């Protein structure tokens, strides 16, 4: 029988019965897993170790991807198991996660994608509040955007790493689809487009062509733009489909970002006093911020240890030091973990060559 032909009713009911039996079996197995997770949680509390270990969860997902033989798509493994681990982790202790709010932001989607939905959500008005809540202990973790594939680094997030004690313990990234959302189902009559400055920049060409006369108004988040659009038919927002559902808006133009492959990378931050540096997973990134004396060849000398010890640099960004002396901080991502001897030696020599050196974190790379 061709695959597109409908199954006879009896066969369909039989298959549904088999699905129901498997679902009951899965539920039983998940509850057995939850029992073990509860026991692990008791041991962790007794020894004072954290409930969430990003390298452990990354290793679990990577191992499952390796043994998956289909027909379940391998890319589906991570989101399924993140939800399973999230539910089990919540039995150990509630995980409080701060992110740029309100409901419906891409930061919220990133938080849910990384931690699963069994978390205590703490939406914040801006990145400063995310860092403050996590530094003060109101949140166990913070989720902040650090880089966009088309617009580059998120400078405020980078600056905050210099002035807070937080370190990076994980990362996640997601495709960012900006949709024009509005109270009425039409592009006609839009006077203002409200969105985060990054979103306005990522949709610059589309807005110039389709809404050339509309004011582009920066707001704290795309979801805040969607909230405002819900009160005024002359306003439109650039936001996610989730934001459209959250605020009862029409998607009047889908996927208007200029780059079809627009992607944003988010850092998972925590206080090092509460969450230690993740152990090596085999697929790690080490992030640091450094500065060097303003002299000829200083940057070359700074990078020489990486070449000497065979450590790959995956990102190199500069930010003004705001000292008035034309000095810069350099944000660097390295491939590897300090537990690897060559990485440890490179970091030691790099530290000696720098006027300022701060390890921002070492963590498993995105396993989505």
Image (tube, rainbow, N blue to C red):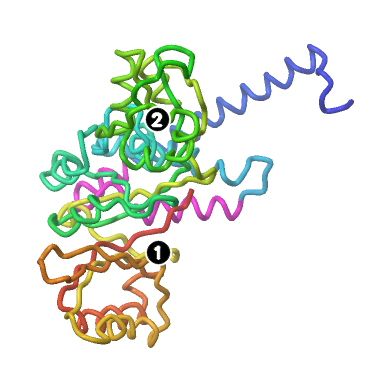
Give how far across and how far down residue 152 sits, in percent. 37, 54
Relative to 350, say whether 33 is above or below.
above
Q: In the drawing, does residue 237 fall left or right of residue 95?
A: right
Numbered circle sitting on residue 238: 2
Q: In the drawing, does residue 34 fall left or right of residue 302?
A: right
Q: Picture quarter containing residue 344?
A: bottom left
Give how far across and how far down residue 172 sits, in percent. 40, 49
Residue 35, visible in the rendered structure: no
Give how far across and how far down residue 368 sits, in percent. 48, 48
Pointer 2 with pointer 1, Cβ within 8 A: no
Q: Circle 2: is it few (<14), some (14-19), or many (20+) Cα within 10 Å? A: many
Q: Which residue is mark 1?
A: 284
The foreground one among 94 and 97 is 97
Residue 219, visible in the rendered structure: yes
Q: Which residues are magenta?
A: 39-67
Q: Circle 1: is it few (<14), some (14-19), or many (20+) Cα within 10 Å? A: many
Nearest to viewer (mark 2 / mark 1): 2
> Which residue is drawn at the image coordinates 42% and 47% (left, top)?
173
User: In what element is the residue under mark 1?
Assistant: strand
């Amino acid at each position: 029988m061709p695959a597109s032909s409908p199954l006879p009713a009896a066969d369909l009911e039989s298959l549904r019965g088999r699905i129901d039996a498997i679902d009951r079996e899965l539920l039983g197995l998940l509850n057995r897993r939850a029992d073990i997770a509860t026991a692990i949680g008791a041991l962790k509390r007794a020894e004072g170790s954290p409930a969430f270990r990003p390298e452990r969860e990354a290793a679990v997902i990577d191992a499952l991807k390796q043994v998956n033989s289909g027909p379940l798509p391998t890319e589906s493994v991570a989101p399924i198991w993140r939800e399973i681990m999230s539910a089990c982790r919540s039995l150990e202790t509630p995980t409080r996660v701060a992110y740029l709010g309100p409901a419906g932001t891409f930061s919220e989607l990133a938080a849910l994608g990384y931690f699963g939905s069994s978390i205590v959500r703490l939406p914040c008005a801006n990145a400063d509040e995310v860092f403050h809540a996590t530094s003060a202990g109101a949140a166990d973790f913070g989720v902040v955007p650090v880089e966009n594939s088309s617009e580059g680094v998120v400078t405020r997030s980078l600056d905050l790493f210099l002035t807070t004690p937080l370190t990076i313990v994980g990362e996640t990234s997601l495709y960012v689809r900006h949709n024009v959302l509005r109270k009425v189902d039409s592009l006609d009559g839009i006077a203002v487009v409200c969105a985060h400055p990054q979103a306005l920049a990522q949709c610059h060409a589309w807005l110039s062509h389709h809404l050339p006369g509309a004011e582009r108004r920066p707001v704290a988040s795309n979801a805040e733009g969607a909230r405002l659009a819900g009160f005024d038919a002359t306003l439109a927002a650039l936001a996610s489909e989730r934001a459209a559902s959250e605020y009862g808006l029409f998607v009047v133009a889908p996927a208007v970002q200029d780059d079809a492959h627009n992607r944003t990378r988010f850092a998972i931050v925590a206080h090092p006093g509460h969450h230690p540096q993740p152990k090596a997973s085999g697929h790690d990134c080490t992030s640091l911020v450094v500065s060097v004396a303003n002299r000829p060849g200083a940057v070359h000398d700074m990078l020489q240890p990486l070449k000497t010890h065979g450590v790959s640099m995956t990102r190199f960004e500069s930010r003004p030091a705001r000292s008035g002396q034309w000095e810069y901080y350099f944000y660097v991502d390295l491939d590897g973990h300090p537990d690897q001897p060559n990485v440890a030696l490179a970091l030691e020599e790099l530290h000696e060559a720098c006027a300022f050196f701060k390890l921002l974190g070492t963590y498993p790379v995105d396993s989505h």
